[in-house]
Image (cartoon, helix red, strand yellow):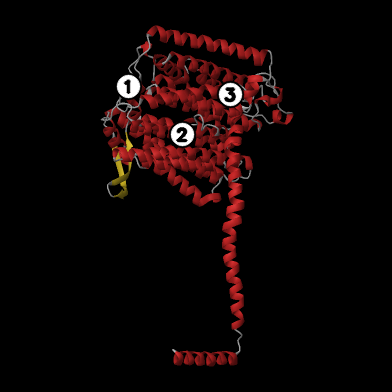
Amino acid sequence: MVQFAWLIPMFPLLGFLLIGLLNKRLPVSLSGGIATLMVFLSFIVSAVIFGEVAQDGSVPERVVLFDWISVGDLSIPFSFLIDRLSVIMLMVVTGVGSLIHLYSIGYMHHEQDHPRYFSYLNLFVFFMLLLVLGSNYIVMFVGWEGVGLCSYLLIGFWFKNIDYSNAAKKAFIMNRIGDLGLLLGVFLIYTTFGSVGFREVFESARHFPENSEAITAICLLLFVGAMGKSAQIPLYTWLPDAMAGPTPVSALIHAATMVTAGIYMVVRSNVLYVLSPDASEIVAFVGLTTAFFAATIGLKQNDIKKVLAYSTVSQLGYMFVALGVGAYQTALFHVITHAFFKALLFLGAGSVIHAMGEQDIRRMGGLKKALPITHATFLIGTLAIAGLPPFAGFFSKDEILAKVWEHSPVMFIVLAVTSVLTAVYMLRLYWLTFYGDFRGTEKQKHHLHESPATMTMPLVVLAILSTVGGFIGMPEVFHAPHFLNEFLAPVIWKVNHHEASETFEYMLMGISVVLLLLIMYATYNTYVTKKVMPEENDKDLQGFAKLVANKYYVDEIYDAVITKPLNGISSFVYKYIDQGFIDKLVNGTGTSLTGFSGVLRFVQTGNIGGYIFSMVIGIIVILVLTMIL
């Protein structure tokens, strides 16, 4: 069945072509049904291949579709790599992707341009699957660029709104900055190893000394690409603005696909990062800074999707910290659990928005009774991301903290504080949305209703996965098999063997649970019992609260330091070089030719006698000149 791996990306590509060509001739239910079916078929094929790989434990297999680039000594086939890492990512992308497609049928039923939406969604999944399946950095780069393009199309889906269009452009441009680093890294890989194939590069890299300049440079350049795609400081500001797109798009981009591409790429390149501890330390530091920085911003956001967006940035920081300390399986473990609970939270937020037509949590409250399924599933997602056992986030976050403790107690403390902040802003979001008095308008209250089955079914499935998903990686102290670590062992070159003591593990789990229960009580007491509401205006805030509410003014700083100077330079070049010199040169040439032609046209009078007279004069002149010369 492995030889049929090409079917996995082919189904979404077929869906894109079919829906795109038929366009508005398709009713919403049919275009959504086709798109969902295609991704689900990819999931079925992925599941079968996953079963084969898990059962026989076969070595990685490369499926060559055709010879692609052949120039001199460079030969790059268009081929897929089927191994334990790729099949796990395939299951996550197609599984969560199909649920989001199904959810979109209900969420976008009112949209007039639904075929365009579903065709973009299928194209996005196609490129993400290319990224995951590619057996070399070039095929991976095609998928990498493709998801960047599709994110631009989907974030700016409602392009008539200038703010949404600007958000799409911002995402596209910031990703291009990161992609330049990735591309330079790929060039350096070829010049260093003479190949861009994963197998050849990693085999050659094993013979390099630790912290060699070439390997470190490659790792840092690749990480620049990961910073852009996975929204790490300083290339993170595009992701909160990406909330301009439809909510299912936010779930798809922020949960299981695009933003995890950087994590996947580093895990895939783990051989290079193991050989460069210096680069790995930088990865851990950037991830730690991003995790804490974004978590503080989440404390004072009032847009339900913005809170989840900064949560995503913070959780991606967790993953990069795990990568930086060499815990590659742990990072992927959190990718999987995060895909479940973050997709659930975004889709739950979409269900709330669908019912209210509102995104500000200050205008919500008391939705528990009106939206029972949404409430129950959102609660599970909240507890999962906060890290309460037995929900999925508890296991992966606990494992990250344990690995970080072995690497650096200082980093552990910062990450532990970040974990506390995560629980605070997520429980704040939950209490303000579903408890207390309803703070919307009477019209909104009258129209409150639970979402249709196409939207609630994916919520239930994701809630189940968010509950049981963590059991694929049980803590060491339970002496139970860690299925994910065992499954991924052949893919990771050097496994991090440093394990925290059982005493520390029990203390970590115990303190985490007690702290979380205290946070639940404190936030409930604040936002439900005492009915403390967020400030209506940021101007009412003071000090640090105002700083985080305004996101540390990072966008304003970028605008003042980068955007405005570039706009000024562009205006100068346009006015004085483009218009003042180039346009005048081009227009002057045209004007001169027009004037010269205007003079010459008087020679053409249309008088035959005049033409004969001119011919005679010409002949006489020629004869005279011939006689003289």
Residue at 56 percent across and 44 percent down: it is: 114
- Between residues 583 and 491, which one lies in front from this camera angle? 583
Q: Position of residue 538 (x, y in %)?
A: 69, 25
Is residue 38 in sight in this rendering?
Answer: no
Q: Please indicate whether residue 599 sits to the left or right of residue 88 in the image.
A: right
Secondary structure of the residue carrying numbered label 3: helix
Label 3 crowding class (10 Å Cα cut-off): few <14, some 14-19, many 20+? many
- Between residues 330 and 449, which one lies in front from this camera angle? 330
Q: Is residue 309 above or below residue 16?
A: above
In the picture, which quadrant includes the C terminus? bottom left
Q: Amino acid at mark 3?
A: Gly
Q: Position of residue 500 (x, y in %)?
A: 38, 12
Quarter holding residue 484: top left
- Between residues 227 and 133, which one lies in front from this camera angle? 227
Q: Amino acid at mark 2?
A: Thr
For label 2, the residue is 257
Q: Is residue 405 above or below residue 277?
A: above
In the picture, which quadrant includes the N terminus? top left
Q: Are dots 1 and 2 in contact, CB under 8 Å?
A: no
Q: Are dots 3 and 2 in contact, CB under 8 Å?
A: no
**Between discs 3 and 1, the one toward the N terminus:** 3
Secondary structure of the residue carrying numbered label 2: loop
For label 3, the residue is 298
Quarter holding residue 88: top left
For label 1, the residue is 495
Quarter holding residue 521: top right
